[in-house]
Image: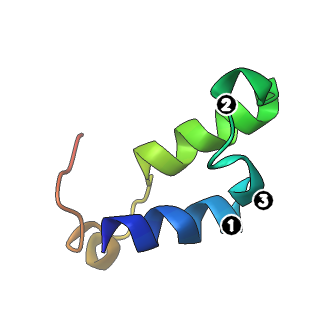
Amino acid sequence: MADARVSQLLERFGIDHIGDNEITRASGGQLQRAAICRAIVMVTHDPPVTARADRIIY
């Protein structure tokens, strides 16, 4: 399940083609997008959205 989610996020951010490549061949922008894919951070003030989170930091 996690592998499918990773593939989905890599595709969504337009970096699915670098998934199996050597990391040193990725550009700075591609590395930043990969970091976002790993973090899955969300910022909101909407209580119903917040209620769905696994972890909340105020």
Cα distance between the residues tagged 3 and 1: 5 Å
Q: Amino acid at mark 2?
A: Glu
Q: Is residue 1 above or below residue 16?
A: below
Residue occupying image coordinates x 20% and y 72%: 51
Q: Nearer the viewer, residue 45 or 26?
A: 26
Q: Disc 1, disc 2: CB below 8 Å?
A: no
Q: Quadrant of the C terminus?
A: top left
* Label disc, if present, on residue 14 of the rendered structure: 3
Cα distance between the residues tagged 2 and 3: 17 Å
Coloring scheme of the render?
Answer: rainbow
Residue occupying image coordinates x 53% and y 50%: 37
- For this view, does 55 lie left or right of residue 37? left
* Label disc, if present, on residue 22 of the rendered structure: 2
Q: Is residue 10 above or below residue 18?
A: below
Residue occupying image coordinates x 79% and y 33%: 29
Residue 31 in view here: yes
Q: Residues within 10 Å of mark 2 (few under 14, many from 20)?
A: few
Cα distance between the residues tagged 1 and 2: 17 Å
User: Which mark's residue is nearer the viewer, 2 or 3?
Assistant: 2
* Label disc, if present, on residue 11 of the rendered structure: 1
Residue 48 x %, y % = 28, 79
Residue 35 x %, y % = 55, 36
Mark 2 or mark 3, which has the lower sequence index? 3
Determine the residue located farthest toward the top in the rendered image: 24
User: Which mark's residue is nearer the viewer, 1 or 2?
Assistant: 2
Q: Amino acid at mark 1?
A: Glu
Q: Disc 3, disc 1: CB below 8 Å?
A: yes
